[in-house]
């Protein structure tokens, strides 16, 4: 992956609906060449999917919490159990005092409490510690420009 691929990725992260002609202009390529590079980035799994960024508050998911999950056993095989809870946006097996870190979105703190209750139904879960986010300063996607060695 060279600096042009990285710039294409940055452009797509800003607006994935741009035409290949616009992408090409932004990075100094023809529309066809931009299309071919994007196709290869998809083929190689660099671009995993194209999505729309949705305002959580606008769709009734204004409460954001990070939940540390304690366990009595290895949780690395529990991905499906965590994925079964639709309020969980991310689940990570971690090193440290807890076993799993979750990113959870709900409409209310009462719904968050219900998610915490349902977590205890997962085999091995022995405790949780939730941190509710009061304000988000910013969120940003991964920068494809980081580590550009070309």
Image: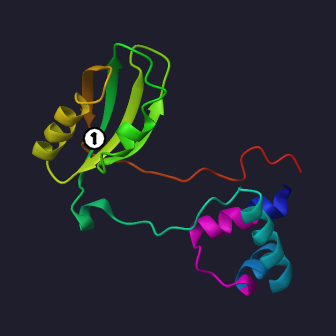
Overall secondary structure of the magenta section? helix
Quadrant assignment for the N terminus: bottom right
* x and y, in percent, of residue 48 in the image: 63, 59
- Quarter-wise, where is residue 147 in the image? top right
Asked whether 119 or 130 is in front, the reply is 119
Q: Quadrant of residue 40?
A: bottom right
Q: Does the stretch in magenta take in 12?
A: yes
According to the picture, the residue beneath numbered tag 1 turns out to be 133
Name the spot of residue 44 as percent of width and height, x first: 77, 57
Instruction: Judge left or right: residue 78 versus residue 124.
Output: right
Secondary structure under the numbered disc 1 in the rendered image: loop
Q: Nearer the viewer, residue 3 or 119?
A: 119
Q: Quadrant of residue 110?
A: top left
| Whether residue 90 is visible | yes
Question: Can residue 30 be seen in the rendering of this structure?
Answer: no
Question: Which residues lie in the magenta part?
Answer: 7-21
Residue at the limit of the structure toward the right, as seen here: 150
Residue sitting farthest toward the left: 110
Say left or right for 28 vs 18: right
| 127 vs 27: above or below | above
* Residue beneath the point at 34% across and 26% down: 68
**Image coordinates for residue 134, horizontal then vertical, percent:** 24, 43
Q: Is residue 35 above or below residue 87?
A: below
Q: Residue at x 86, y 46 (%)?
A: 149
Q: Mark 1: few, some, or many residues within 10 Å (few <14, many ≥20)?
A: few
Give how far across and how far down residue 89 sits, in percent: 38, 48
Is 129 contained in the magenta span? Answer: no
Above or below — where is 46 with respect to 130?
below
Say which residue appears at 38% left-offset and 44% top-offset.
83
**Numbered-mark total:** 1
In the image, residue 110 above or below residue 37:
above
Q: What colouring does the structure picture have?
A: rainbow
């Amino acid at each position: 992956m060279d600096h042009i691929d990285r710039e294409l990725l940055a452009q797509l992260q800003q607006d994935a609906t741009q035409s290949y002609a616009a992408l090409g202009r932004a990075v100094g390529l023809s529309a066809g060449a931009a299309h071919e590079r994007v196709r290869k980035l998809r083929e190689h799994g660099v671009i995993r999917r194209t999505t729309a960024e949705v305002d959580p508050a606008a769709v009734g998911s204004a409460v954001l919490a990070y939940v540390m999950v304690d366990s009595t056993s290895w949780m690395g095989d529990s991905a499906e159990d965590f994925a079964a809870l639709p309020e969980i946006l991310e689940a990570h097996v971690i090193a440290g005092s807890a076993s799993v870190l979750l990113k959870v979105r709900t409409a209310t703190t009462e719904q968050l409490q219900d998610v915490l209750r349902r977590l205890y139904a997962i085999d091995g879960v022995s405790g949780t510690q939730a941190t509710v986010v009061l304000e988000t300063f910013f969120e940003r996607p991964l920068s494809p420009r980081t580590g550009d060695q070309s």
